[in-house]
Image (cartoon, rainbow, N blue to C red):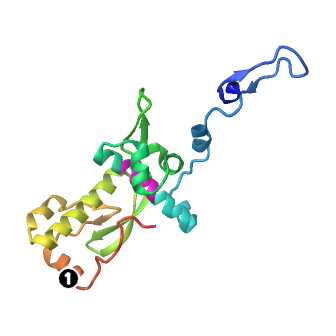
């Protein structure tokens, strides 16, 4: 029974299969999950079904939470409403396995669609790196702080910052106008 889960190759010495090389049974469930992982780019993102987009969105949020709160993959997945297997399926490049067996988040180049506040208005942009995703998230936080407190200093760090070929909005009057017309009424900065 235990040999069924052993990984590696074997070569029978007797019988009709003597001399042929075979793989042992299923190595681990994690390897099976990783074998089904999906790579998503701008074109294939549009082909995903709504449940797949939602599952991917939850999975992409897990490495960010792991890095932000220094928690385990399992705990972060539970808090985001998904499973570690789903995270391996959709966001494997965002994880690094340490010699201890623990997974940690690492910078990645996973494609994601996000809502950004740009000089062109509040629009969806395609983001290719975790650094750009963090920039958009920090900009959203700074805009909320500005609108709540009126402190323009929080916006200074985002001047001349570009995401997907568009400048992030830092003009206080433009941000106040966007808020007045209700452009900030969305549930998440990640597009489902």
Q: Is residue 88 above or below residue 161?
A: above
What percent of the width, then of the height, locates residue 24? 71, 27
Q: Is the N terminus in the top left, top right, bottom left or bottom right quadrant?
A: top right
Q: Is residue 74 above or below residue 126?
A: above
Magenta segment: does it hold 99? no
Specify the segment rendered in magenta.
58-64
Q: Write the residue at 33% across / 63% down.
A: 165
Pointer 1 residue: 177
Residue that extends furthest to the top in the rendered view of this protein: 13
Residue that extends furthest to the front in the rendered view of this protein: 1
In terms of image quadrants, where is residue 136? bottom left
Residue 128 in sight = no
Q: Residues within 10 Å of mark 1 (few under 14, many from 20)?
A: few
The number of numbered discs placed on residues in the rendered structure image is: 1
Q: Is residue 177 above or below residue 106?
A: below
Q: Secondary structure at mark 1?
A: helix
What percent of the width, then of the height, locates residue 170? 18, 68
In terms of image quadrants, where is residue 185? bottom left
Which one is in front, 63 or 181? 63
Q: Write the residue at 34% across / 43% down.
A: 71
Residue that extends furthest to the right in the rendered view of this protein: 16
Residue 126 in sight = yes
What percent of the width, then of the height, locates residue 177? 20, 82
Magenta segment: does it hold 62? yes
Q: Write the residue at 43% across / 44% down.
A: 74
On screen, residue 37 versus residue 174, left or right, reads right
**Would you say the magenta stretch is mainly helix, strand or loop?**
helix
On screen, residue 74 versus residue 117, left or right, reads right
What percent of the width, then of the height, locates residue 97? 44, 34
């Amino acid at each position: 029974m235990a040999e069924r889960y052993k990984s590696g190759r074997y070569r029978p010495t007797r019988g009709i299969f003597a001399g042929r090389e075979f793989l042992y049974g299923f190595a681990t469930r994690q390897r099976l999950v990783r074998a089904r992982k999906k790579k998503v780019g701008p074109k294939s993102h549009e082909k995903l079904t709504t449940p797949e987009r939602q599952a991917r969105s939850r999975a992409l949020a897990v490495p960010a939470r792991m890095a932000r709160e220094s928690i385990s993959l399992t705990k972060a997945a539970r808090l985001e409403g998904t499973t570690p297997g789903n995270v391996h399926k959709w966001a494997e490049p965002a994880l690094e396995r340490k010699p201890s067996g623990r997974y940690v988040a690492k910078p990645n180049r996973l494609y994601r669609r996000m809502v950004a506040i740009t000089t062109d208005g509040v629009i969806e942009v395609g983001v290719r790196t975790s650094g750009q995703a963090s920039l958009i998230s920090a900009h959203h936080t700074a805009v909320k702080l500005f609108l709540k407190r009126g402190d323009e200093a929080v916006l200074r760090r985002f001047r001349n910052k570009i995401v997907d070929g568009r400048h992030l909005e830092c003009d206080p009057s433009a941000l106040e106008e966007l808020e007045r017309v209700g452009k900030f009424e969305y549930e998440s900065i990640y597009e489902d």
